[in-house]
Amino acid sequence: MTNAQLELLKLFSRDVPEEDLIELKQLIVNYLAEKLGQKADEIWEEKGWTNEDMKRMSREHIRTLYKN
């Protein structure tokens, strides 16, 4: 198990009301979304992308070709 899984198991070793579980899930989702946004901003800056680049990329159809 990962360190995160172990910590969550410790946290949930006692009965937690459903309302609290929902709040905890939302906290985790918000945390991960923030981390993802920061990483995306980092890459955006690294690549020197502009709003025009984003518009162009949003119109592209990039797919992985798989051989049968």
Image (cartoon, grey):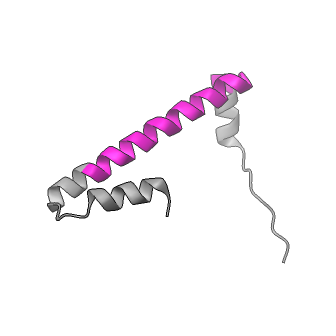
Q: Is residue 49 visible?
A: no
- Dominant SS type (magenta): helix
Counting from the top left corner in percent of width and height, residue 39 is at 58, 34
On whether residue 51 falls in the magenta region, the answer is: yes
Which quadrant of the rendered structure holds the C terminus? bottom right
Residue occupying the point 23% across, 55% down: 22
Residue occupying the point 64% across, 40% down: 58
Counting from the top left corner in percent of width and height, residue 34 is at 44, 35
**Would you place residue 40 above or below residue 24 in this image?**
above
Counting from the top left corner in percent of width and height, residue 24 is at 27, 50
Q: Quadrant of residue 7?
A: bottom left
Residue occupying the point 47% across, 54% down: 3
Counting from the top left corner in percent of width and height, residue 47 is at 73, 26
Residue nearest the observer in this picture, 60 or 4: 4
**Would you place residue 47 above or below residue 34 in this image?**
above
Q: Is residue 10 visible?
A: yes
Q: In screen coordinates, is 44 left or right of 3?
A: right
Residue occupying the point 81% across, 68% down: 66
On whether residue 34 falls in the magenta region, the answer is: yes
Residue nearest the observer in this picture, 1 or 50: 1
Q: Which residues are magenta?
A: 24-52
Q: Quadrant of residue 56?
A: top right
**Would you place residue 13 above or below residue 42 in this image?**
below
Q: In screen coordinates, is 41 left or right of 35?
A: right
Q: In screen coordinates, is 2 left or right of 57?
A: left
The residue most toward the bottom is: 68
The residue most toward the right is: 67
Label tally: 0
Q: In screen coordinates, is 3 left or right of 41?
A: left
